[in-house]
Every structure is written in C-alpha cells, then in structure tokens.
Image: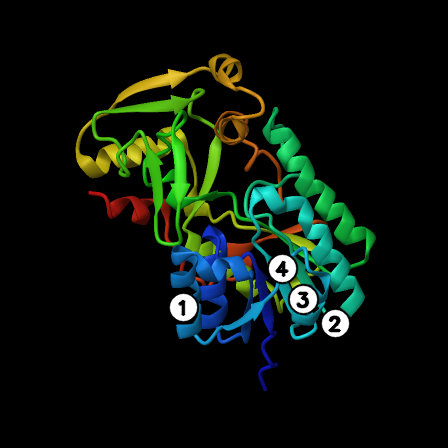
Amino acid sequence: MASEKSKILVIGGTGYMGGFIVEASAKSRNPTFVLVREASLSDPVKWKTIQSFKDLGVTILHGDLNDHESLVKAIKQVDVVISTVGSMQMLDQTKIISAIKETGNVKRFLPAEFGVDVKRTSAVEPAKSFFARKVQIRKAIEAKGIPYTYVVSNCSAGFYLRTLVQFESSLISHTRDKVIIFGHENVPPRDKVTILGDGSAKVVINKEEDIAAYTIRTVDDPRTLNKTLYIRPPKNTLSMNEMVTLWEKKIGKSLEKTHISEDQILKSIQVPMDVFKSINHAVFVRGDQTNFTIEPSFGVEASELYPDVKYTSIDEYLSQFT
C-alpha cells in the first residue's frame, strides 16, 4: 500500500522557479499549498499565475514572511515546506525557520537553494557574499535541528541554453513563462559566440521542469533526508566547448569564437552590481559545479536516485532552436 503523499507548502511560488515547483507538486498529486501576499493579488502577472495554480487544484493561503502568525497558521497545515524566495529575501528565511520550529510538525524543509553548492564554491565578490547568505540559512536550519534537503540544481536552461550563454553583459528579466534577455536575441547564436575562459570547465544545465520534478520526488525520500540533492545528469554535464560543438553540428556551420580570459572577466566584475557575472566566472571558468565528487556522507545525485524521471538533455533542448 502506497504511503500518503506529503502536503507541501511553497513559499515564493509566484516567482520564476517557484512556479515550476508548484506545478510539479500539484501534478504529482501532492496536496499543494502556496503562501501568497495580499499585494500579489493586485499584480496582473502574479494574479494570472495564482489563477493557473487554482486551476491545478492548489490551495492559496494568504500570508507574509513578515507576519509570523500567518506563517505559523500556514505551516501547521502541511508536512513539507519549500522556499523559492528571491535573492533579496534570502535572509528572511530565518522567519520561516522560526515558524517551523514553533509548529514542530514539518518533516522536511527545502530552503531557496536551486543553484551551485554554496559550501563548495570559489566565487569571488559579489557572488561570494550572496552565497554566504545561503550558507547562513543552512547553518540556522541545522542549529535548530530542522530536517532538510538542499537542492543543488546548478544552471537553469531557460537562462543559459536559450542563448548558449551569450549574455555576459546583458540585463535579464523573467516571468513565469519566459526569460527575456535584453541585448541578445533569445535564441542561440548562428554566427559568432563568446566563450568564458578556455571553455573546458564542465557545467551542468537542467530544464526547469526537470529541476522541479526531481525536487518533488525528494520530499518523501528517506535517502535525501539531511542531505544535498545534486541534479547532475550525465547528458547535461558538458563543457562550453562541447555545447558549442553540439550546436554547430545542429546548424551545419562553424561559429566564430571569441574567448574572454579569466583575467579579463575578473577585471570587468564590478562590486556590488555584477553578481551574475561573478557566478558565471565560478561556474564556467572555475568549474565549481563539477570539480568535486558527490560523497554519500553529504549528498546524492538525482538522476541516479530517480532513473524513471525522463529529463531533457542539453542536446534535446537545443534542438528546438534549429
């Protein structure tokens, strides 16, 4: 007899990654709840997202990170809490931690990670300070003895593969349905390409829907309790050079390649503005996502743990643009 699926509360569900998590939770038939601020109801974009959640059978709870009573009330109704709050609210997750500790009923908390492993990174400023805030949240969770899973999803395809990593100096905006990258067409290049460093560092890029599917699978899995779930599927672990070669084969032509040296990148990073640029340096030049072995003592790899999840490979993802 199958065990009952956990009730899941998503905090930050109307944000970019949050939307995918909510959808995956609802489609997996977990009773799904989303904490929504009153202000979100008057935002046309967020209102549309909230309506799509309702269509999936999701329960909308009204509350706010800054309203302890509403947080406690929401958390009392669920078994698992997933936070997908944005970078500006990263440290506000201490309020979620306090509410979880007070209620005492949560069997798993997944904080807003969804990127590189912040404990295994060589990032320079300003990314270094940004990642330090996530480390601070991890420490607070562990200090309170709250059961957790950290999801290291690495790079999102909607950001990186749509342009084949061609936005080093671009501004980025995103909604639930699409990522808009100003300064570049929202497709991979067909004439010339810029490569960070020598292009040999192995990078992991996953489709958002796959990240969400793996995340939901982990909530009731004892193998991921108090561990880090690394989403590092073999077909999505490629170097920039390998990705460019893959794309060239698809379009039947060679691209003109320009390399930006590590020294040039480091000199171009402005603190505190260029968080994104310093993250890309850590990932695409230093190889932070793949330069360590996932040891059973601290982590597990998602595609090994859940071989039945049919993830979209980088090769398959790029095919939509040919």
On the picture, is 250 further left or further right than 277? left
Marks 1 and 2, how far apart at CA: 29 Å
On the picture, is 3 further left or further right than 59? right
Q: Secondary structure at mark 1?
A: helix
Q: Nearer the viewer, residue 195 or 126?
A: 126
Disc 1 to disc 3: CB gap under 8 Å:
no
Going by the numbered disc 2, the residue's amino acid type is Asn
Q: Secondary structure at mark 2?
A: loop
Count residues near mark 3 (Cα–Cα under 10 Å), then give few for <14, some for 14-19, many for 20+.
Answer: some
Disc 4 to disc 2: CB gap under 8 Å:
no
Marks 1 and 4, how far apart at CA: 19 Å
Instruction: Check disc 2 and report the residue beneath it.
Output: 105
Going by the numbered disc 3, the residue's amino acid type is Ser
Q: Quarter-wise, where is residue 69 in the image?
A: bottom right
- Residue displayed at 74% across by 72% down: 105
Instruction: Check disc 3 and report the residue beneath it.
Output: 70
Which numbered disc covers residue 51?
1
- Quarter containing the C terminus: top left
Disc 3 to disc 4: CB gap under 8 Å:
yes
Report x, y in % for residue 214: 51, 59
Q: Secondary structure at mark 4?
A: loop
Question: Which color scheme is applied?
Answer: rainbow
- Residue displayed at 66% across by 62% down: 223
Which numbered disc covers residue 64?
4
Marks 2 and 3, how far apart at CA: 16 Å
Say which label, 2 or 3, has the lower sequence index: 3
